[in-house]
Image (spheres, helix red, strand yellow):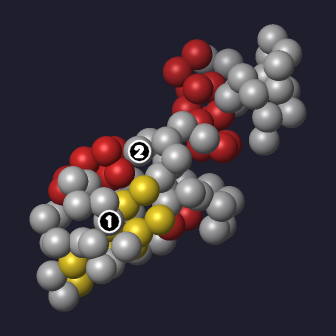
Amino acid sequence: MKYIKNVTTLRYSADACTGCKRCLEVCPRGVFVMENGKARVTDGSLCMECGACSLNCEFGALHVDAGVGCAAAVLNGMITGGPPSCDCSGDSNGAGCC
């Protein structure tokens, strides 16, 4: 499953990457691969913005605004069993979020 193309907040700095492979270990979507001793983003549109890579990169090579956008709405809907909702509209059903 991919989200809307090129809308995720994932940012990667190859200069800061040390090749520790932690992002590969923690990413649930397989967004990263190793290439020439450094991580590389395969397809940023696979990112669900969970924040695991950013939280686990001690070298500051990765940043993502965790829990934002429609990816969060889809996950919240799956967790609650209801429609996608990121609770950003101010009403009780989260309509209009995405």
The percent position of residue 26, horizontal first and vertical second, equals 25, 49
Residue at image mark 1: 61
- Front residue of 84/50: it is 50
Q: Residue furthest bottom?
A: 36
Looking at the image, which residue is at 18% across and 88% down? 36
In the image, residue 82 above or below residue 5: above
Q: Is residue 52 left or right of residue 66?
A: left
**In the image, which disc is placed on residue 13?**
none
- Front residue of 55/30: it is 55
Q: For residue 17, say whether it is visible.
A: yes
Which amino acid, by three-letter code, is at mark 1? Answer: Ala
Which amino acid, by three-letter code, is at mark 2? Answer: Gly
Q: Is residue 65 left or right of residue 19?
A: right
Question: Quadrant of the image for the C terminus?
Answer: top right
- Front residue of 17/82: it is 17
The answer to whether marks 1 and 2 mark residues whose Cβ atoms lie closer than 8 Å is no
The percent position of residue 96, horizontal first and vertical second, equals 86, 33
Looking at the image, which residue is at 41% across and 45% down? 51
Residue at image mark 2: 51
The percent position of residue 46, horizontal first and vertical second, equals 50, 60
Q: Residues within 10 Å of mark 1 (few under 14, many from 20)?
A: some
Q: Residues within 10 Å of mark 2 (few under 14, many from 20)?
A: many
**Dot placed on the residue nearer the N-terminal end, 1 or 2:** 2
In the image, residue 82 above or below residue 98: above
| Quarter of the rendering containing residue 15 | bottom left
Q: Secondary structure at mark 2?
A: loop
Looking at the image, which residue is at 52% across and 47% down? 65
Q: For residue 27, say whether it is visible.
A: no
Looking at the image, which residue is at 27% across and 72% down? 16
Q: Secondary structure at mark 1?
A: loop
Q: Is residue 1 left or right of residue 40?
A: right
